[in-house]
Amino acid sequence: MTPPTSDTPLSSDRRHKRLRLDLGPRAYDILIGQDVLGLAGAEIAQLGHKRCFVITDETVARYHLDALTASLNHNGIKVEALVLPAGERTKSLTQLEKLTNNLLEKKVDRHSLLIALGGGVIGDLTGFAAAVLLRGIDFVQVPTTLLAQVDSSVGGKTGVNSPHGKNLIGAFHQPRLVLADTEALSTLPRRELLAGYAEVVKYGLIDDPAFFHWLETHGHAVIDGDPVARLKAVHTSCAAKARIVAADERESGQRALLNLGHTFGHALEAETGYGDRLLHGEAVAIGMMMAFDFSVRLGLCPAEDAERLRRHTASLGLPTDPSQVPGQFFAPAALIEHMTRDKKVRDGRMTFILARGIGKAFITSEVNASDLQDFMTMTLAA
Ligand SMILES: NC(=O)c1ccc[n+]([C@@H]2O[C@H](COP(=O)([O-])OP(=O)(O)OC[C@H]3O[C@@H](n4cnc5c(N)ncnc54)[C@H](O)[C@@H]3O)[C@@H](O)[C@H]2O)c1
Ligand SMILES: O=C(O)C(=O)C[C@@H](O)[C@H](O)[C@H](O)COP(=O)(O)O
Ligand SMILES: [Zn+2]
């Protein structure tokens, strides 16, 4: 049989996949696939809210707000849209204050629903606004970037950045529903697709070597827009995240595996000031490579596994090294200082996600400060 390509229509039962994140009273569905924006009205109507506010950014509004609004209107739901500036700097206390004031002026009430239409920035900010407005109201995630579809829309981590570090102000607040329209990715720039792809690779590296192997063969198809490959990549990623979150909603243990690459990555992001020079997913790509290289240096991981990761991400055009961040010099001490503010620090001890190989990530607090210092000095001098 000829494998489907981006030109091959999918039969309707293969156009969508539905997952359930099982969290008892906070359980919710994740619907993934083609024309999910068209189904959004019917899905959201079932939640029974009288007033809905769509929170989005200027770029996403241009491409996808009309389709979502039409679908909601078609199902008898009136919406008001609030359009924010695009980009990581919108994930700030300043924008949170503006957004919550705006919603309060419009007399948002405890039966209102917020709908986050956009990438991780809009999802994290809207989710946090929903967590704190009137001590907590409902929200739905409608992710439109690959990163948001495979990671940020699922699991209930919401928040904003602080000058002290990434996501340092936030709350766990689960959405009522996640609606991921894979066709919405057709308007996403390649650089943003690649950044999201880093979080896809993460699931293979954590505990699914077969998925990593599949990505080595099909990663280009995921990036180039093959609908079957995209559906599989988003579905496999959400299934992995849902499984981990269901077992440890508030990151008291195994959920920290989802932070692979983030201890290094968040430090790089904080140092670049959350601008366009380094996207979150790019920082994670570099951070995961650093976690593997560090694991090799500590004698924990075969060097060939780190090389396999480097080969795969580099072949798609993702950065693998801090020196690839344009116009930025990273000092080891500055990065280590950021790492000491990581949310995984306990009693002054840093926690790292390291790996014994591809698909064999593990959590450890047994890292020696001098080993870290030597590794950072070596990596940043290279
Ligand atoms: N909560 C979590 O569990 C979690 C997980 C991973 C990442 N995050 C956070 O997510 C954020 C990054 O999210 P992101 O990568 O989606 O960035 P983003 O939200 O800034 O979106 C990236 C860019 O793409 C544009 N865009 C979005 N959808 C588009 C579309 N369909 N077509 C064209 N342009 C589109 C946006 O306007 C923006 O300019 C970071 O702040 C990160 O910390 C959170
Ligand atoms: O959902 C999680 O748990 C993650 O760690 C997913 C990460 O990809 C994401 O970037 C998350 O926001 C990082 O969380 P943080 O607690 O380190 O801020
Ligand atoms: Zn992330």
Image (cartoon, rainbow, N blue to C red):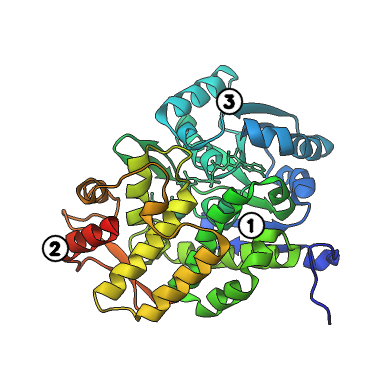
Judging by the rendered image, the residue that carries numbered circle 3 is: 108
Q: Give percent across and percent down for residue 18.
A: 68, 62
Q: Amino acid at mark 3?
A: Val
Give, as a three-letter code, the residue at label 1: Ile
Q: Quadrant of residue 106?
A: top right
- Please tell me how crowded label 1 is: few (under 14), some (14-19), or many (20+) other residues with Cα within 10 Å: many
* Residue 340 appears in the picture as rendered: yes
Q: How many marks?
A: 3
**Picture quadrant of ligand 1:** top right
Marker disc for residue 30:
1
**Reading the chain from its start, which is encountered first: label 2 or label 3?**
3
Q: Write down the residue under mark 2.
A: 370
Looking at the image, residue 376 lies above or below residue 11: above
Nearest to the observer: residue 30 or residue 37? 37
Q: Label 1: state its secondary structure.
A: strand
Q: Are marks 2 and 3 in contact (CB under 8 Å)?
A: no
| Cα separation between marks 1 and 3 | 26 Å
Name the spot of residue 44 as percent of width and height, x first: 71, 44
Q: CA distance from mark 2 to mark 3?
A: 52 Å
Q: Residue furthest left?
A: 370
